[in-house]
Image (cartoon, coloured by chain):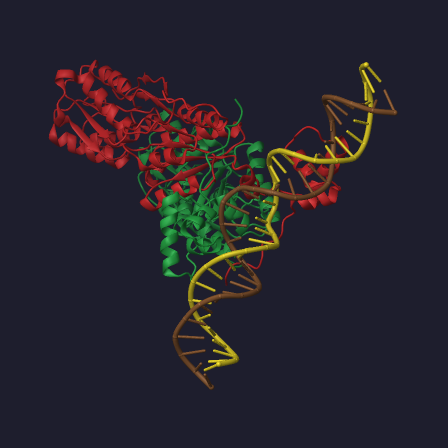
Chain colours: A red, B green, C yellow, D brown
Amino acid sequence: MPLPATPPRRATIRDVALEAGVSRGTVSRVLNGEPYVSAEARTAIERAVAKVGYVPNAAARNLARRRSQAVGVVVHEPHSLFLEDPNIGSILLGANAALSAADHQMVSLVIDSERDSRRVVRYLGGGFVDGVVIVSARRDDPLLAAVARLGIPAAVVGRPPGMPPVPFVGIDNRAAAQAITERLLATGRSRVGMVAAALDRDSGADRLAGFRAALGDRFDPRLVVERPLYAYGAGRDAMRELLEREPTLDGVFAASDVVAAGALDAIRDAGRRVPDDVGIVGFDDSVWALRCQPALSTVHQPAMDLGRKAAESVLAQMHGGAPQLEGVMLDTHVVWRASA
Amino acid sequence: MPLPATPPRRATIRDVALEAGVSRGTVSRVLNGEPYVSAEARTAIERAVAKVGYVPNAAARNLARRRSQAVGVVVHEPHSLFLEDPNIGSILLGANAALSAADHQMVSLVIDSERDSRRVVRYLGGGFVDGVVIVSARRDDPLLAAVARLGIPAAVVGRPPGMPPVPFVGIDNRAAAQAITERLLATGRSRVGMVAAALDRDSGADRLAGFRAALGDRFDPRLVVERPLYAYGAGRDAMRELLEREPTLDGVFAASDVVAAGALDAIRDAGRRVPDDVGIVGFDDSVWALRCQPALSTVHQPAMDLGRKAAESVLAQMHGGAPQLEGVMLDTHVVWRASA
DNA sequence: CATCGGTCTGTGACCGGTCCCAGATCGGGC
DNA sequence: GCCCGATCTGGGACCGGTCACAGACCGATG
């Protein structure tokens, strides 16, 4: 069976106008809360709206107004990670809070394949959204180029290398990573390694850079294992590899809490105690940090605020503000718990 | 500064037609892959599309076609829970997989307040989506009533009491809860309680019913503590209360893995060992089950498939299929690990 | 050679709103 | 009584597509 006959016809603004005995223009004015409408017309229209069960047609309004009252939030991560990493969820919630307050609809778009990517670009260019927040973009991300080309208001969470001039909201990953590594070193560890991840993004690359800076002369590239994603499995496997390479390891910095959780399990599986034999620290301060046994020492980053600020930047641009290309950096701090 | 002058004018189908030297109709035919277009016209149009940088305007297409190629997925849960409970995420991913395969855009809508609720109803009625999947609806949920009234293709994950005739996809929560409780009893526990949650939904109410059925005569209402949401904090606090009420408790069924995780921590804080002193089982088989120490015995439910099937039902209705009101029930099974 | 079915194309009406201009109405000031 | 500005209303043009219809063209057929 093909498409259904005809979707049940909904009441339009003309039906309301007819019912209320006024013109379409007046109905439109009432619906949009504009001044210069008599009280009688207003009440008649409100009554008519209720009577005919009128619901405005968004497509028609978007077409005429050339905007949609919706903002896209693009997350460029595999679906699996979306589940694991509460950090992404927090960013989305922050964005949603800001958009919701401005009465805009958030539309979240997950890219997990080339096909998704094309569909998202089509979606963004198709007038479905008035602006876009981009999370976890990669180095030289084609999506960023596409957005810049389309000229829609945008903001990026993070600051991927090779980014076109687009406003961004981020944290100083390098300084934060350096701070927590130094703190770890101060607990008297002598052989400290790192499970690095996502080096194709600023967060991953900068965390590694901060680690390196903290170690200075003591930095040993053999004690760094890299993985493409911030994932539990990546942390576990990488840690196993690291312990084989360097059995005397007594400290490790994991690039995120999820990675640290995996690493922690690998350390335990190898028969070492945390923090006695090996100290471990993470990054994010997500719910994973508290779920670990022992609780993770980590870097707190204001994930919700990152999403919120990015969304606010997009909203400001949508209302004519000039894009703030210099970017916004939010504060982080070390949270010291039991794992190191 | 108010709204920007005018958004940069995009190329329209007319520009393409002009450039290719054909009519709008022919361009439209090519764009939609219809037959009866000459090869020359086709290539000329494809070249013109690339040259002028044409991107179709979705609002115009939606208006003319009276559909949007998008499906909404409504999650009626507080934002905080969204972060904690991977079960919801899995359902979304399943839905997204099905929609993505059918080249439809998933639009996820979170309801966390009355205001959100109104906005979502407006959104759904506004022609933004052609169908809707509803997750975690409550007893007599007004959203379900609104959707039924609007007459848009819909499917519900779960089967809330007081639901209008809408297709649903679910599991037999009662039987599954009974099965795992019986299994727990079979480990020789004599004082078994339950942390129940979300009794305003079928999942919560049915899990309690299954627990009760498994205990039969031994059921003691004093050993059941209820909480409104499937949340970590709820599990922890409820467990604390349960242990105070009944210090000889030696087994507990938590209504979900997240709840079980909270309960587990409360048990440990009270100085009891798991599973030696107290056996605990959860429900969902989410990533939390493996993150717990010891790993949780739980009920595996095919969360992704729930989302996928619900989305497929909506897609089928959109293509003219009759709604399958009898519903679809998916299988579950007990996964036995170390916590009981 | 007229007829016919299959291809291919152009055109006007329409989807349901917004926007803006022209004009009506009205009270107040000179 | 006339002019003026403020208030209020109607209606045409338009947003950018889709769709149905009419008609042109073509080779095959009787």
Q: Nearer the viewer, residue C5 or B158?
A: C5
Name the foreground residue: B152 vs A191: B152
Quarter holding residue B257: top left
Q: Position of residue B75 (x, y in %)?
A: 49, 39
Q: Position of residue A114 (x, y in %)?
A: 32, 44
Image quarter in which the C terminus of chain A is found: top left
B228 sits to left or right of A232: right
Residue depicted at x 66% and y 30%: A34
Q: Is residue B81 left or right of residue A9?
A: left
Asked which quadrant contains residue A192, the reply is: top left
A125 relative position to A232: left or right: right
Along the viewing direction, whichever of A148 and A223 lies nearer the viewer: A148
Residue A265, horizontal then vertical, whole percent: 24, 32
* Number of marks drawn: 0
- Asked if one can make out residue B42 in the rendered structure from this viewpoint, the answer is yes
Residue B178 sits above or below residue A189 on the image:
below
* Any part of residue B129 in sight: no
Q: Residue at x 37, y 42 (%)?
A: B285
Residue A61 location, quadrant: top right
Residue B66 placement (x, y as % from top left): 55, 50
